[in-house]
Image (spheres, rainbow, N blue to C red):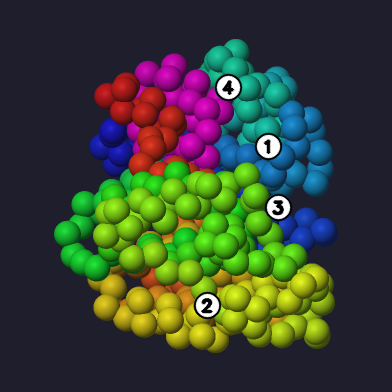
Amino acid sequence: MKVINEIDITGKRVFIRCDFNVPMDENGNITDDNRIRAALPTIQYAIDNKAKVILASHLGRPKGKRNPKYSLKPVAKRLATILGKPVLFIEDFENPEDKAKLEALKDGDVALLENLRFWEGEEKNSKEFALKLKELFDVYVNDAFGVCHRKHASVYALAEISEIAAIGFLLKKELEYFDKIFTIEEKPFVAVIGGAKISGKLDCLLNLLNRADKIIIGGAQAFTFLRALGYKTGNSLVEEELIDEAKRVMDEAGRKGVKLYLPVDFVCSTSPEDESGYVIKPYQEIPKGMMGLDIGPASIELFREVLSDAKVVVWNGPMGVFEVKAFAHGTNRIAQIIGSLNALKVVGGGDTADAVERAGESDNMSYISTGGGASLKLLEGKTLPAVEVLEKKQ
């Protein structure tokens, strides 16, 4: 695939598909602008090379309808502040007045289109919608790693019909790091897989069994494994229909010589809202009516020992309900332990990136992905449709 710096963009209208799907509070204030900042190298390169820059993204799930709650207007304001220059906000690129504003852009100017998911055609991968967008630009650039696992119009159909198409620096970096994970020869390779459900991580676990020397399993999905081993788990989250799949993962690990580690104790309470009445119990003694909401101190110590000699670490999924202070300690400690290692440390996006940020360990990781779903797809050994379509073009 061509990268933006390998094509001539001077004086051209360059459409850059970014991932500005940032968290906001109830007043529409951006609470974390990491995804905006991650796109800056590509945007700044286009500005410096005198392109007419047209940015586009989605935000949330407005389901094809205009909803002020999901407007990208706050993103335009934040971006203008960061860039130190105006960012023209385009509410409706189909409107003749707004279209005229885009046509009047000068070299080095920046515009941001309203949330692409306000149009039904975006999530339907509509070619008709893609053709309307195509009228706006000369060069197409995809820098939205976080949405590359989806077949949506702005990353798939539009890439398919664009004569000149390239990727941005962020997408290039993401793909390089995930490629490195599966090609680096240093050992041991340790995968830390957390999160609530085994259903979302099953393919990831099965694929990592071909690569990892050790796999640590945390989060609520650990309870499905404990049930597969015949233990009672109180009211903890268990996916009953996947107990056999958990057994299959453990059997495969044994067959391939991969060491699989489960938590040995838990911080238990009646619910995530009950922060005062928690108790720490070994995995065999989770009380009736209680659920495990974080890994306990013995598990932290066990996982520290497992990670101590790691040369490559991939982490996807928190160890517990890290958003609640009483159940955040396990995730915070794992972030600190991984952060202290002299190893290649790659963090999957989404909740894990948020957890690492909260733990103050972001600067100690080799790379933090901007895309949860997309990074998971790569860890599953699958291809990303939006990348595949660009590879085919070349």
The quadrant of the picture occupied by the C terminus is top left
Earlier in the chain: of badge 1 and badge 3, it is 3
- Residue ID at (30%, 39%): 3
How many numbered marks, from 0 up? Answer: 4
Residue located at (39% from left, 25% from top): 389
Q: Residues within 10 Å of mark 4 (few under 14, many from 20)?
A: some
The span from disc 1 to disc 4 (Cα, nearest Å) is 17 Å
- Horizontally, residue 330 falls left or right of residue 50, namely right
Q: Is residue 361 above or below residue 259?
A: below
- Which disc is residue 264 wearing? 2
* Residue at image mark 3: 74
Distance between mark 1 and mark 2 Cα atoms: 49 Å
Residue mark closest to the camera, 3 vs 4: 4
Q: Residue furthest left?
A: 185
Nearer the observer: mark 1 or 4; the answer is: 4
Seen from the viewer's position, the closer of residues 376 and 164 is 376
Q: What kind of element bears circle 2?
A: loop
The kind of residue on which mark 2 rests is: Val
N-term-proximal mark, 3 vs 2: 3
Residue 132, magenta (yes or no): no
